[in-house]
Image: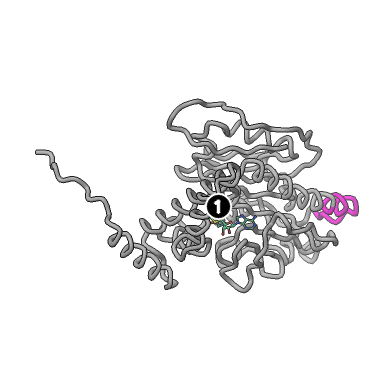
């Protein structure tokens, strides 16, 4: 027998009780229940998207309502960030940067600041220490997997809102490329940030801004290679790399022959999988075309049911060019995620 009992619509007092429960959960540092964190993340994204539409349409009533929703205790950026931190707990699959660490190990990238492995034939020749730096855009915590790789003198962590003293409160879009090449960044991590940017043009601009940092790192690497500082006695890649590659990963070349910094400058990009698997305007092919035009090639890729991870090497000399919002896959059940490069 099927039940005829209807789901009761929450009354305003029930909604108010739920709001109070959500804000008191947010007041503690304990991970939030997964249902609550998913709900907070979803409603923050939806409100943000509506706000950007309202701004484009100059709809002042909607702008006021959505701005107040986005500054309420359960709708604001910090609530969203706390919900995202809960989603990163090891019980819920851990943070995305553990994939980056796995890839670095596969590629034989030593921890920065570590002396290189001795050459077995010349044990006293350790070569120059590996000194390369990480810029993380949109950082919630300085204790994720990647942070055990980069000691804190080799990393800069940014976020629009900082949840920790080490994280600089900074909009990446106004963060300048360092004047000194030695203070530049060889690895940029942009995990689940591009999808946070509210407009397609804003996403294209973010990729272009990242490329300025990558270009600086590429010039630095070229100088180093010209000076002959890239010792082949550096740490050798792990021997088992080929057997570790899965179907969803694209090996750029046999890592056995690679120098330790062959994959630098590198961009780690993570997006929710539906951004490329179920969007009307963006497919993996189109994302690939955009990235190639900006000067990147894929070194590693992994698709999980929820997320898609890419490790790109910046090789420069991108052809550039514009990418518009063009419908590629029509259909009612698709999302509207797009990247526009102007
Ligand atoms: C979903 S969280 C992702 C956090 C983490 N990187 C991860 O992979 O789980 C998105 C973060 O990006 C930050 N963010 C978005 N746009 C940004 C910008 N222009 N500059 C700096 N941080 C930004 C947001 O404040 C938010 O904390």
Taking 51 as reference, is 297 above or below it?
above
Image location (x, y in percent) of residue 330 = 50, 25
**Residue sitting at 64 percent across and 44 percent down?**
203
**Residue sitting at 36 percent across and 63 percent down?**
19
Q: Is residue 129 visible?
A: yes
Q: Which residue is mark 1?
A: 99
The local crowd at label 1, few if under 14, some if 14 to 19, many if 20 or more residues have their Cα within 10 Å, is some
Residue 17, image quadrant: bottom left
Image location (x, y in percent) of residue 307 = 50, 45
Specify whether 38 is left or right of 95.
left
Image location (x, y in percent) of residue 282 = 58, 34
* Residue that protrudes farthest toward the right in the picture: 227
In this view of the protein, which residue sits in the foreground, 260 or 210?
A: 210
Residue 83, image quadrant: bottom left
Q: What kind of element bears circle 1?
A: helix
Specify whether 57 is left or right of 183.
left
Q: Is residue 240 visible?
A: no
Is-magenta flag for residue 188?
no
Q: Which residues are magenta?
A: 220-231
């Amino acid at each position: 027998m099927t039940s005829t009992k209807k789901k009761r619509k929450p009354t305003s007092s029930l909604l108010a009780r739920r709001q109070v429960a959500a804000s008191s959960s947010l007041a503690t540092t304990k991970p939030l229940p997964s249902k609550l964190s998913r709900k907070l993340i979803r409603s923050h994204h939806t409100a943000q998207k509506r706000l950007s539409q309202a701004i484009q349409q100059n709809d002042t009533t909607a702008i006021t309502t959505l701005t107040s929703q986005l500054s309420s205790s359960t709708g604001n950026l910090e609530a969203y960030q706390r919900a995202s931190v809960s989603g990163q707990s090891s019980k819920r699959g851990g943070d995305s940067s553990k994939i980056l660490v796995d890839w670095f190990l596969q590629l034989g990238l030593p921890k920065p600041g570590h002396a290189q492995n001795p050459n077995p034939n010349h044990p006293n020749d350790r070569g120059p220490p590996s000194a390369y730096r990480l810029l993380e855009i949109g950082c919630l915590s300085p204790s994720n997997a990647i942070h055990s790789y980069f000691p804190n003198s080799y990393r800069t962590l940014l976020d629009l809102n900082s949840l920790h003293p080490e994280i600089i409160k900074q909009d990446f879009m106004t963060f300048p490329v360092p004047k000194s090449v030695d203070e530049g960044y060889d690895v940029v991590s942009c995990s689940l940030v591009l999808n946070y940017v509210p407009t397609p043009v804003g996403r294209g601009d973010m990729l272009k801004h990242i490329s300025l940092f990558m270009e600086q790192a590429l010039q630095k690497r070229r100088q180093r290679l010209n000076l002959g500082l890239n010792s082949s006695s550096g740490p050798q890649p792990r021997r088992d790399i080929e057997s570790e590659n899965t179907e969803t990963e694209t090996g750029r070349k046999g890592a056995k022959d690679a120098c330790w910094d062959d994959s630098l400058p590198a961009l780690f990009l993570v997006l929710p999988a539906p951004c490329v698997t179920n969007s009307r305007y963006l497919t993996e092919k189109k994302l690939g075309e955009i990235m190639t035009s900006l000067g990147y090639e894929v070194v590693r890729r992994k698709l999980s049911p929820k997320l898609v991870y890419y490790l790109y090497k910046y090789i420069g000399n991108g052809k550039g060019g514009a990418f518009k919002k063009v419908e590629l896959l029509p259909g009612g059940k698709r999302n509207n995620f797009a990247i526009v490069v102007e």
